[in-house]
Each structure stands twice: as structure tokens, then as C-alpha cells.
Image: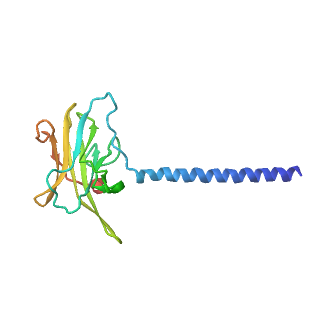
Amino acid sequence: MDAARANKRHAGIARMYHFILRIVVAVAIILAGCGFLFPKRYVAPKPGEPLATLTLAKPTKPSLIPIEPVQYFDVFEDASCAKGGGGGFLGALTAPVKGVLGKLSNNQPREEYSVVPDKQLFLRARMVQTLDSRRRSLTTNNCTNLVSFTPMTGEHYIASQLYENDRCRLIVTDAKTGAAPADLEFVPMSGECHEN
């Protein structure tokens, strides 16, 4: 009788072990999937560390695009756009979204971010449009640009991507002078820069 009881107890422990193992595996899969659902974020300076400010701004000129696109901005440490180190998603400027009672929400024309100063950064901007109908949805990546510059400690820069003269450009200016940073460079894209 004791052997039967011991076997029953071991079987119960084995079932509980398998149940816990299934939960652990499910949680691990969900957490691993978060990397796909939530992109790696840019690592901004910590409070008290030197910083520069980068404001992402919607273009002030009317867009030739009939539906306002979503603009995504990423910062990388080199022209490969690899998401290693401190590089990753910086922020987005979204199209108007109807909120509660038909009011527009989630439509900020400007977003301000802290960036690491005195170190060359690579800023990638992408415009993405989604055209929705009742039955179908079409998402297009209208344009992607990559620029490089070195933000200086305490300085403020403004980045805006716009369509002008039938082409898409990413413009970065010094907020004080309105001029482009002296070392601003438009970088040809390759490798991971074309990926979302």
C-alpha cells in the first residue's frame, strides 16, 4: 500500500512539474516575442549626464501626400543601423487619430528627446502611410532617410522629414541659428537601414 501511495504521489509531482514547465515556457515565449512587438529603444542620457536636445517636428509646409503619414525616427551609432549598443527607436510623429467623442488625439506636432552629445549619431527617419477601407488596408513605406551629425552639449536641434520638389528629405537644423549642423551629412543606406 505504501508503494501505491508513493507512486501516486510521484505521479502528482510529475504532473505539477509539467504544468509549471508549460507555464515557464509560455512566459519565455511571450517575453522573447516582446522584442518583435516592442522595438529596442534608444538609450538616452541619464538624469544629470550631459545631453543635447533633438525635437522631432512635423513639416510646416503642406504635404503633397493626401493622408498624413506616421513618421518613425531611430538613432544608431553607425551607418549600418545595427540595433546594438545604445541605438534603437527614438520616437514617432503620428497621424491624426479620432479619439473619444470624435476629438483628435495622439497628434502631437513635435516631440522632444534627449540625445548623447559630442558623439556622432545616425538619425533614420521613415514615413509610413496606411490607407484603410472597409475591406482592405494598404501600408506603404513612402521614404526613408539617414543623416549623420554630432550634437553638441546643451544644444537644441530640430529634425523634420518632408516632401519637397517631388522628393523626400530629412532636414536637421540648429534651433538657435536655423542652419544645419556643420557636420550634417546625408548617408547612403545599406544593410539593416532598409529594415523596419
Residue 17 x, y percent position in the rendering? 67, 50
Q: Is residue 188 left or right of residue 37?
A: left
Nearer-the-camera pick, 131 or 153: 131
Label total for image = 0
Residue 78 horizontal/vertical position (percent): 26, 44
Residue closer to the observer: 7 or 114: 114
Q: Position of residue 152 (x, y in %)?
A: 20, 33
20 relative to 42 in the view: left or right: right
Using the image as rendered, state which of residue 40 and residue 81 is in the foreground.
Answer: 40
**In the image, 46: left or right of 148?**
right
From the top left corner, tell me how far across and down residue 133 is, in percent. 32, 69
Residue 196 appears in the figure: no
Q: Residue at x 58, y 50 (%)?
A: 24
**Residue farthest to the top, as pictured:** 48
Whether residue 131 is situated above or below residue 156 in the rendered picture: below
* Way the structure is coloured: rainbow
Residue 171 visible to the viewer: yes
Report which quarter residue 134 is drawn in: bottom left
At 24% from the left and 34% from the top, the residue drawn is: 52
User: Which image quadrant for residue 174?
Assistant: top left
